[in-house]
Image (cartoon, coloured by chain):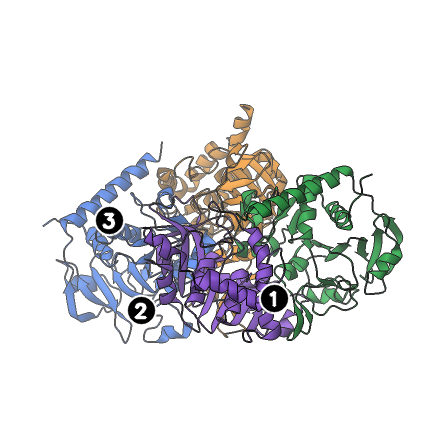
Chain colours: A green, B blue, C orange, D purple
Amino acid sequence: MADYTPDEIMTVCAARQLKSGTVCFVGIGLPSAAANLARLTHAPEVVLIYESGTIGSKPDVLPLSIGDGELAETAMTVVSVPEMFRYWLQGGRIDVGFLAAAQLDKYGNINTTVVGDYDKPSVRLPGAGGASEIATSAKEVFVMLRQSKRAFVETIDFVTSVGFYEGGNSRDQFRIPGKGPTRVITDLGILTPDPITREFVLSSVHPGVTVDQVKAATGWALKVADDLGTTSVPTAAELTVLRDLHARTKQAHAEAAE
Amino acid sequence: MADYTPDEIMTVCAARQLKSGTVCFVGIGLPSAAANLARLTHAPEVVLIYESGTIGSKPDVLPLSIGDGELAETAMTVVSVPEMFRYWLQGGRIDVGFLAAAQLDKYGNINTTVVGDYDKPSVRLPGAGGASEIATSAKEVFVMLRQSKRAFVETIDFVTSVGFYEGGNSRDQFRIPGKGPTRVITDLGILTPDPITREFVLSSVHPGVTVDQVKAATGWALKVADDLGTTSVPTAAELTVLRDLHARTKQAHAEAAE
Amino acid sequence: MAKITSLATAVAENINDGDTVAFEGFTHLIPMAAGHEVIRQKRRDLTVIRMTPDLIYDQLIGMGCVTRLVFSWGGNPGVGSLHRFRDAIENGWPHKIEYEEHGHAAMASAYAAGASGLPFAALRGYLGSDLPKHNPNIRWVDCPFTGERLAAVPAIRPDVAVIHAQKADRQGNVLLWGIVGVQKEAVLAAKRAIVTVEEIVDDLNAPPNAVVLPSWVVSAVACVPKGAAPSYAHGYYPRDNAFYQRWDGIARERETFLKWMQDNVIECPAPDSKVRAHG
Amino acid sequence: MAKITSLATAVAENINDGDTVAFEGFTHLIPMAAGHEVIRQKRRDLTVIRMTPDLIYDQLIGMGCVTRLVFSWGGNPGVGSLHRFRDAIENGWPHKIEYEEHGHAAMASAYAAGASGLPFAALRGYLGSDLPKHNPNIRWVDCPFTGERLAAVPAIRPDVAVIHAQKADRQGNVLLWGIVGVQKEAVLAAKRAIVTVEEIVDDLNAPPNAVVLPSWVVSAVACVPKGAAPSYAHGYYPRDNAFYQRWDGIARERETFLKWMQDNVIECPAPDSKVRAHG
């Protein structure tokens, strides 16, 4: 039984959510690692799309940016950014939008814009990028981030990308094409939305993690699913592929600097 | 002094209207012959754009259709048809729109849609194609057609492509970006709009053509410019290039059929 | 994922009576063979969409497959009229057809809107034109910033898009080049898409930023060499301009038209049935 | 027709204090050298537009060239914050800057609208987002056919677009490939355009349907090899990801930032002045 870090089980667990043939619009960072791990293990035919316009990228090393050359060189084709957002995302061609987040509330609404007041932010974050439309135009959305009270909050400071808004059917008022966030994968477990209230509840914990640990890392009173599961541990094969991918990436990004 | 046909002097005279460097959106048929004659004689740098998406075409033979392979093979680049109409024509990048017409009225409005009633046409013509927006988005428009009472009418049956509408400033109500038709070149002479009434008047006759002949071939009471000019005759060089072009074209279109 | 199959199967499985079908192509890459298969399979009550309906639309109309046409330029390019199209509109033969008429700028924008998942397209179009008086699908929208009034047309969202391309690979990914028209937009705007190709290859070898349609936006791919003739396929064969000129004589009279269709379409198997027999 | 000239002349002749300038590039082909020349020429009161403002915008802001920023994602990709951008927004150093914030889908559509001569772009965007509460340039428009409400943003029409491309020919026609971003739209939306290129060649040898900008839509072309570094030019040199990581340390403090700019930008001539000296 290989041992592994919390980031590793989070990435492995997120990768497992993607099926071969799924068309996935990949956010940079954690989602990109997970999506490529899926491609290199159980889902060789997963189609990875990056907002820089690359369709069907098969990078050998992880991109640092959303537009690294590796993504274009290994893509089936590269389209312009207006075409990517209009024909492919807004056009309804994306099965899964895979997003990271800075802040998340219990209804899966995401903040990547500001901490504090918008006009006088205590921390200015990068902003929406493609996320606000990925969240609404993709058929469903997976969210991936490390679990902590700072990130998992009762109320987010700014809704950058809407999830289930104020819960229940409140989101319907926006006539959103996609069905929204269907799972949140963290370093402690997996959260899924209650079918009625749409509040995210703990549906699986990673091995060795207690429910109390997860509650302690959550800024709202986290509910637990009746059928709470336990994530199966990463296989040696999954970990080997993931570690090789990270090693290749580290070396490539260092080399780039002559 | 070479002798020549009415079509030949019309084409030569139309070609002379184009300057090197002018970006010309070329209609098929007569305008295409004139535009390419200009390119092969005095205006080698004229930029020919066809609605099929070809930019900077330099065909060796005249296309039968607006999308012959010759246009793509000799183009600087080929863009999609939506890009052509949106970025290049509507985007205001065209200096001259060069149109043919079935019917024309004294204000330079063009009909290429129907003869007779729209819902019960006596003759159904091909329709607008790109012409209605070429007429309004190009910075100026040249029209080229053979002169006859059937074509030059007091009132056209259908406005496909607007010219000066009902004359004077009546066209301003449409907030049209381009300045409209600035000349009509025929097999008998050249008509240009009166600066005030915007009615097309005879400003030049081709050699050997009388004003009465032109009036007899016009369906409205044709006015004559005070400074009526006479078109200078086609040079031997112009005629040689034009006839070679037509000869190459005839042969190429026959060959295409195995 | 696209199913790589015969033309007959592709048409049978994807085009139904009453469907709205866009057989697109802008002079280049006209899906002529696919249109012939639709005629052989006797599809009826089709609404057909095309910026530049040409010979294949003349044939579909003359053979009674069409009840409604959406178009922006209907002619035999550089030759003259489409006689079957005119006979249907002017005399209702073989039956009356309805038509919705636009300009190229509007239709190109409407295809792009359809591909973009938008309900309409705005354009600086139809200024001073009589067409809006006759087409209730030409409306107006005001810019919420400048107040300018722009023309608006509904997005085109066909049930099926049918196109011809140069190449597909064995996974059903498609590459086309040259005059690419509105084919990418038509496929992405449609619910289903049939693509006929000149050849199926191991590797598309697509240049950077080429027009590629991934297998997962295509329903069926059929290998139909010369499937665009008498139109052309850039890099494969030229446009048979002489045939377009001959068509004027063939289609002018109903009898000569019907005889030609019988001899050259109805009694001919789909080209790829022969090709496939040879392996 | 594009004037083929030095970077210094291109900037001096085309960018004025107070202009609205889009230095575009989506990770690839960032016009870094052109931005440095703008800093050396001490342009002021610029409104700068960019979907993904990165290091060059951090530098323009930190050096006081910018009074207003229009953007949709402001960060050091894969690394973290743009410290000069944050210092200006959070602390008003070197002076306060205004900003107008959008999402990528809206800005990409707004550039396309600008290139298309339209006053606005409609999109299915900002649904449930808080951004419309803070940005009065996000409005709504109703579809005249379905009644659906769509987001609307004003077209982007910069005074000047600045991009970097791989090649130009001696007439000033430009070719770019790989990740092409919104550069074609930015150039076609702008009144003037400056293009820096890796090399000037006799023949572009552009593949069919490549992204080519004809000389007559470009104001000035300057040959600036490595003009995109530490970003990359596909086919020429890779992205210097390590430098992007180092920038985090350089830009974190005002002093280290100013020293780096002094040593590496202010006191360096335009790269092509050297190149040109060598012939």
Q: CA distance from mark 2 to mark 3?
A: 32 Å
Report in which chain the residue with disc 2 lies.
B
**Residue farthest to the right, as pictured:** A226
Describe residue C189's horizontal placement relative to residue A181 as left or right: left
The image quadrant that residue B226 belongs to is bottom left
Left or right? Give the position of A43 relative to C41.
right
Residue B107: give x, y in percent of width and height: 31, 69
Q: Decide: few, some or many residues near mark 1? Use Cα within 10 Å; few <14, some 14-19, many ≥20.
A: some
Asked whether the beta carbons under mark 1 and mark 3 sit within 8 Å of each other, the answer is no
Amino acid under disc 2? Tyr
Residue C209: horizontal and vertical position, in percent?
49, 47
Q: Quadrant of residue A135?
A: bottom right
- The percent position of residue B169, horizontal first and vertical second, equals 34, 76
Name the element at disc 3. helix
Q: Are both tags, 2 and 3, on one chain?
A: yes
Residue C131 visible somewhere in the drawing: no
B103 vs D13, nearest the viewer: D13
Please give the residue where the numbered disc 1 appears in the rendered image: D150
In the picture shown, does residue D220 fall above or below C85? below
- Relative to residue C250, is residue C69 drawn left or right? right
Give me the chain letter of mark 3. B
What residue does disc 2 label? B107
- Residue B5: give x, y in percent of width and height: 18, 50
Q: Amino acid at mark 1?
A: Leu
Badge 1 marks a residue whose secondary structure is strand
